[in-house]
Image: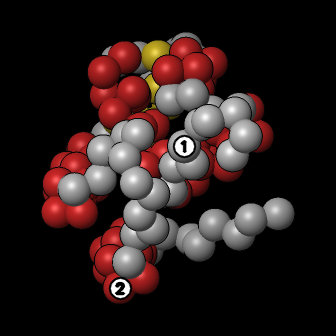
Amino acid sequence: MASGKKERSRWQITLDLLKVTLEEKNAKKTRIMRRAYLDWRNFQRYFDCLLEEGFISKNLGNESYMITEKGKDLLKKLKEVDAVLGFKMGGPKILIPWSLFLLLHYLYQWPVFVES
């Protein structure tokens, strides 16, 4: 990339969204999007999936969101994956091994994101 920014994998974006949602506690979408460094289109794609799958929930009565127990469990698993692969932000780009992706997909019955 010409701008010097590192690309994040899908699981890293998911990890970032869950981390920010946990840290912010009752944050609005715009705050989560900005702290996760995502544009609106990509934010909507990932956030909507996390919301639909029950990893994040909307608070009744206002437009804020919080992480669910299921989301905390996924966050823990993604942090473990991060530790095993030794991937740190700014480090070399490592794509998630296909078998690990399939395992996470199987555990959480995630829909597969399709790039448009």
Task: Judge whether residue 88 can be spotted in this image.
Answer: yes
Mark 2, other Cα within 10 Å: few <14 / some 14–19 / many ≥20: few
Residue at position x 45%, y 57% in the image: 93
**Who is closer to the viewer here, 59 or 36?**
36
In-image side of 69 versus 10 (left or right): left
Mark 1 vs 2: CB contact within 8 A? no
- Which label sits on residue 6? 1
Q: Amino acid at mark 1?
A: Lys
Q: Quick one: quadrant of the C terminus?
A: bottom right
Q: Going by the picture, which residue comes out furthest to the right?
A: 116
* Left or right relative to 34: residue 65: left
Q: Give, as a three-letter code, the residue at label 2.
A: Ser
Residue ID at (71%, 69%)? 114
Q: Earlier in the sequence, mark 1 or mark 2?
A: 1
| Residue at 42%, 82% in the rendered image | 98
Q: Secondary structure at mark 2?
A: helix
* Residue 95, above or below 68: below
Instruction: Measuring from the top left, give residue 106's x and y in whole percent.
Output: 37, 80
Taking the spot 37% from the left edge, 40% from the top edge, the residue there is 89
Disc 2 target residue:
99
Crowding at mark 1 (Cα within 10 Å: few <14, some 14-19, many 20+): few
Is any atom of residue 73 visible in this view?
A: no
Q: Is residue 96 above or below residue 20?
A: below
**Marks 1 and 2, Cα distance to the nearest angstrom?**
24 Å
Q: Nearer the viewer, residue 83 or 106?
A: 83
Q: Give percent across and percent down for residue 64.
A: 51, 19
